[in-house]
Amino acid sequence: MGKLKATTTEGRSAAKRGEGAATLAARPLGARSEGHPTMSEVRSSPATNRGELEAPAIAAHSAVQLVMTDGGELKTIAVRLPTNGQIAVIDGLRIVLGEETFSGVVQGVDDDAYVRACSAKLEEIFGFGLVRNLNQRRDFYGETWELGENWGYAGFGGERQNGTILIVLSGKGTLAATAGWEARLYEFITKTAKRPVITRVDLAHDCFDGRITVDQLDVMHTDDFFTNAYTVPDCQHAGNWKFPNGKGRTLYVGTRKAGKMFRGYEKGMEQGDATSPWVRLEVELANKSMLIPFDVLLDPSAYFMGAYPKAFAHLSLVVTPERLQVKRKTAAIAVDASFDMVAQQVGRYVGVLADLVGAEEFVARVRDKLGRWPDRLKMPDAAYADTPVHKQDRKQSFNEYQFGPDDWSGASGMAV
């Protein structure tokens, strides 16, 4: 296979695209680096912040690598760069593996045998397993089972799925999973799983302090910092960019069809805090036009940096906040937003009724009798997941060659 010559376009000015190239971030024409985030002077935390999972030192790949799939399709391999510490974490994952992965441990021949075997392995990896059948088709799979407390799902069956199982872990699922799940999953798919493929992975970096803004990211796109070759990637804006209203804005760079897309959005505002400076940077990699190596699980920062090396260069000395910090920040915003919601919707009733009967009696009369929590205030945690299906009591089934429970008399033979 011939070598692909990598060509960069650094230094290409906005003037080549026309002096009138408009951006939504207000700034003087020609202003480039002034609007970009500054580099941190020192690292804010140790090289790894995920407990037992240590990121190994990995040499850099070349800028572009090509591989030929078994079906004769030419694909690129996701670019990766070495980093000083963990800059990004996994915020979503989709994996497909062959049903034969569990053939050696499946006991029984009922339809749910593979579901229970898969659930047991997922609990071992994530700390929670499959809890209920959602009774719906999804992603062309015949059955979909909920993973944890709606932290993902697994798909089974389906004529077009070539005997595979789909496992989807959402962003909340990565927060709920017990520490070190990335290393355990890597061990499973590299040593035990059959025909494993990572079909999509979302990588995220959180900035809580306003060091990065969506306006700066928009400037960086205009100034070619998201351009890795000749073609400037597509750019879209969601939310009110002309008159920001505190509901949050999102910058999209690239498209899903290309297999790589960037999202920069005001996460704190999305969660309900209209004044929050919290911005999240996300890179979505899909296997439509590239192969996603398994060690993205062990070193997500390398692939995050490799997706847009010029745009993320300022992050080279920054370490992403710990997942516990993300949980706490999300919880604080959710509590404040809940108070605002109650005040706006039933605030007048609360004040009057509390004055009439007293605060203690008022709370006793209006609180949920079953002690249930609103979904918004539930923080993802494996410790609070429902009992997985492989640990649930099962009803004994009978087939046509066995006695039913009402027919069994205890005799050794059948009555004539």
Image (cartoon, helix red, strand yellow):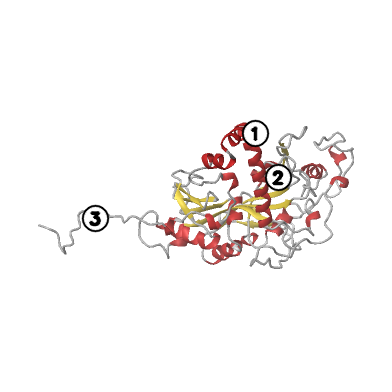
> Residue 397 occupies which quadrant of the picture?
bottom left
- Residue beneath the point at 60% across and 51% down: 379
- Residue hosting label 1: 344
Q: Dots 2 and 1: beta carbons under 8 Å?
A: no
Q: Nearer the viewer, residue 400 or 58?
A: 400
- Which of 233 and 154 lies nearest the eye of the viewer? 154
Name the N-terminal-most of marks 3 and 2: 2
Give 133 or 297, whichever is nearer the viewer.
133
Residue that label 2 marks: 268
Relative horizontal placement of residue 308, taking residue 413 as reference (left or right): right
Choose the circle earlier in sequence order: 1 or 3: 1
Q: Which residue is located at x 77 percent, y 60 percent?
A: 44
Q: Is residue 180 left or right of residue 242?
A: left
Total numbered labels: 3
* Amino acid type of the residue that numbered disc 3 sits on in the rendered structure: Pro
Q: Quadrant of residue 318?
A: bottom right
User: Which numbered disc, 2 or 1, marks the residue that appears first in the sequence?
Assistant: 2
Mark 3 closeness class: few <14, some 14–19, many ≥20 residues within 10 Å: few
Q: Mark 1 belongs to which amino acid?
A: Gln
Residue 316: x and y in percent read 79, 58
* Mark drawn on residue 405: 3
Q: Position of residue 23 (x, y in %)?
A: 81, 36
| Mark 2 surroundings: few (<14), some (14-19) or many (≥20) residues within 10 A | many
